[in-house]
Image: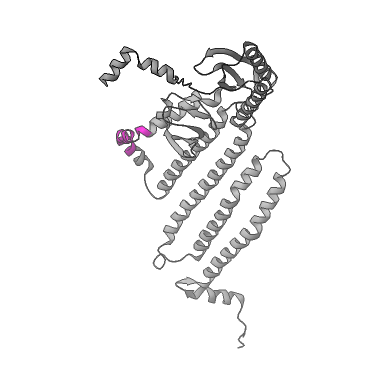
Amino acid sequence: MIHDSNPSWSQFWLQWGETTVLDITLTHWLLGMAALFVTVVMQRYLIRWFHAAAQRMTSRTETPLDNMLLEAAERPGRMLTYLLGILIAVHLLNPPAAVFPFVAWLDSAGRVASIMIGIWFLWRLIEGLAVYFTVRTKQTESPLDDQLVPFIAKTLKLFLVITAILMIAQNMGYSISGLIASLGIGGIAIAMAAKDTIANIFGSIMILIDRPFTVGDWIKTDAFEGVVEEVGFRSTRIRTFGRTLVNVPNSTLANMVIDNIDARSERRVSMRIGLTYDTTPEQMESAIAGIEQILATHPGVDQSYQLVKFDRFEDSALSIFLYYFTASKVWEEYLQVRQEVNLRIMHLLDSLGLAFAFPTQTLHIASDSASDSAASHPFAQEVSHER
């Protein structure tokens, strides 16, 4: 009888199937490693090729939404590929529960990780949509959408987190119906503990509806003054002019008297010019006419309403009242217009030979002869004697 020195492939696989390492056959070890190898190859080459092909397709479309969807799915998709490869490899190993009791736990952890990857994808998608619609709202005239986009984005993220917690709890074996029922039992206690939070949320809704200000506005209250940086669920962030950051609860802010400085269409200038008392009526008339001409010809001055009036005889000056508005409400442009007007007024008064008045006092000193005659008066002598 002749024996074949080279065993057949069937005998080879039979031998592999009977040989075990850690109670796992070599065949299962080979299949598990093959699954991991395929996963790495797919992640490194196939997923990258698919992503590059999808980018070429989306670049041909006009809307950026498909690019945004692809960008949001890239990193979660790679993570999901690794996760599925590991789970498939573990199931192909098929380890006995007596030696490896963690397989059932790994399945549960894999489901939880899959949920978290899905939530991660949706979170990235919401952030991308928020950026997209924020850019779109900059092109509209209404300031309401500028505040609604971040508010809606935060609301969706909060809903996403709550949904993720409920789904993870259900996959971990907790009863969602029992949890909801327990929330009903403890609803009163939760409502009492969260009454300030609920009040702040309603305050933020009222701010969005009433629109007393928008992000970027300069507002002023009895407690603070600054520029609005963000309107959140709980509070509004105000950047003061001292560069500090003030967080004001929305429930408090909704009940405050708010002066929106940026809501005005122009900035007001109210000032006085004092001239010395040696100014003649003719010079005063020329000065008033010249200042009116300066305001009428300056391009940065609003021409709807102006006042230039000589209205007071002050203690040490003849006072001219100026009242006008700048065409721009931007702080720096307002200061520039005011500076240019003031310089033109100075040149005008200098050309007219007029001088600015300032508070003065004149002290009159009597001569010695007058003092002697006063001292010789009987009443003065009497007062001197009493001293």
Image quadrant where residue 384 sits: top left
Residue 196 drawn at (x, y percent): 36, 33
* Residue at 53% across, 23% down: 358
User: 31 or 177: nearer the eye?
Assistant: 177
Q: Is residue 349 visible?
A: yes
Q: Residue at x 59, y 65 (%)?
A: 37
Measuring from the top left, give residue 232's x and y in whole percent.
Answer: 47, 35
Name the quadrant of the C terminus: top left
Quick check: 133 above or below 221?
A: below
Q: Is 129 in front, or is 33? A: 129
Asked if the magenta segment contains residue 186, the reply would be yes
Can you say which quadrant of the picture contains the N terminus? bottom right
Instruction: Let me know if residue 233 appears in the view.
Output: no
Q: Which residues are magenta?
A: 181-196
Q: Main secondary structure of the magenta part?
A: helix
Residue 207 lies in the magenta-colored region? no
